[in-house]
Amino acid sequence: MTVSTAEPPQVCDRGEGVAMACRHDISAIRLPEDHNIEVRRKPVFTISGVNPSLLPSLAWFALVARHCSFTKAAAEMGVSRAALSQNLKALEKQLGTRLLYRTTRDMSLTEAGQRLLDSLRPSLAAIELALRDLDEASGEPSGVLRVNTARVAARHFIEPHLPEFLARYPRIVLELTLDDGLSNILAEGCDGGIRLGESLAEHMIAVPITPPLELAVVGAPDYFRRHGSPMTPSDLVHHHCINLRYRSGGLHNWEFANPESEHEFTVEVKGRYIVNDDDGMLRAALQGVGLVQHINVAVQDAIRDGRLVRVLRDWCPAFPGFYLYAPSREQMPLKLRAFLEFLVEKRDTISLL
């Protein structure tokens, strides 16, 4: 739910409430017999039950709870952290109960705050759906499209086509969250996500946006002149291997499959350089520091122009590529459907070595 004010609204001490009740009461009216006047019953909307000034503040509370952070929530809405914090304090005062535990480094929901959030979620979702239906009534995709995506997918399958997508859909604002972890797109407030097919949750609907991909073992020509080339994955014990550390803390075990038996296995490689960023890993490989294993699309330009050389190709079979996934196809927002159809269109133009 988006609040258009530049600063969060102040919570008023008093106000009429907000539950809509439509009445069709009309007083008896006596008209002169010589006047041909038609009396129409006009609905009169009244508001009762909830202070209307609380509604924006409740939305702000839900946003803070979703991020578990005042800083992130304030950044998303374009307001100051201090203003957002004061607004939530005023909300707690108005409700007469504490909703959040705050420390200098952390925040969490109180029991009352969790109950309130659980009650608010269906209502806020219904409001968001109603606003989305209004936006889509024109038939033109519009609004903020939030997508959580792996970095390599964004770099190679979205960014090259970004100008064309934004020109085709001028009413869409695309917000990408670059995240190589397995995030919960619903908890993060995203419309959809992009991950490798083997990493998808079963309850999600998913559509492939790339052809099948391969892992590629590559190194600089200078490295192979100094150390030779491995002929099988078992030879990697004699090579310097640059490895990737995941956000979870674990290291990437290099993945292979026997070209004859198709038996899949992993190799725990050794080396003197470990990094948690795939771009940093590739830069080191280009300098001749060692070998890397990465998705083929990420290294094919360097292979094509001779800066990297691929080895052990027969031991690296294809696997499902990247998919765009979402909770439901039936309730997919028009803006997300437009993005999906655009990426599927571009899928047919992808050329892999």
Image: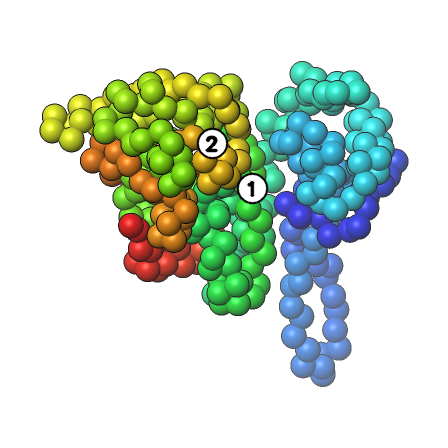
Q: Amino acid at mark 1?
A: Thr
Residue at position x 49%, y 21% in the image: 272
On the image, the x and y values in percent for residue 181 come to 49, 30
Q: Quadrant of residue 268?
A: top left
Decide: is 27 above or below 240.
below
Q: Amino acid at mark 2?
A: Val
Residue lying furthest bottom: 34
Mark positioned earlier in the residue sequence (1 or 2): 1
**In the structure shown, which secondary structural element does the residue marked by tag 2 occupy?**
loop
On the image, the x and y values in percent for residue 229 come to 29, 32
On the image, the x and y values in percent for residue 58 come to 71, 36
Q: Quadrant of the N terminus?
A: top right
Q: CA distance from mark 1 to mark 2?
A: 31 Å
Residue that mark 2 sits on: 289
How many C-alpha atoms fall within 10 Å of the one at disc 2: few (<14), some, or many (≥20)?
many
Residue 338 shows in this picture: yes
Residue that mark 1 sits on: 177
Residue lying furthest right: 13
* Residue nearest the observer in this picture, 50 or 287: 287
Decide: is 115 above or below 194.
above
Residue at position x 40%, y 59% in the image: 342
**In the structure shown, which secondary structural element does the residue marked by tag 1 occupy?**
strand
On the image, the x and y values in percent for residue 68 come to 66, 27
Question: Going by the image, does 196 lie left or right of 37?
Answer: left
Q: Quadrant of residue 74?
A: top right
Which coloring applies here? rainbow
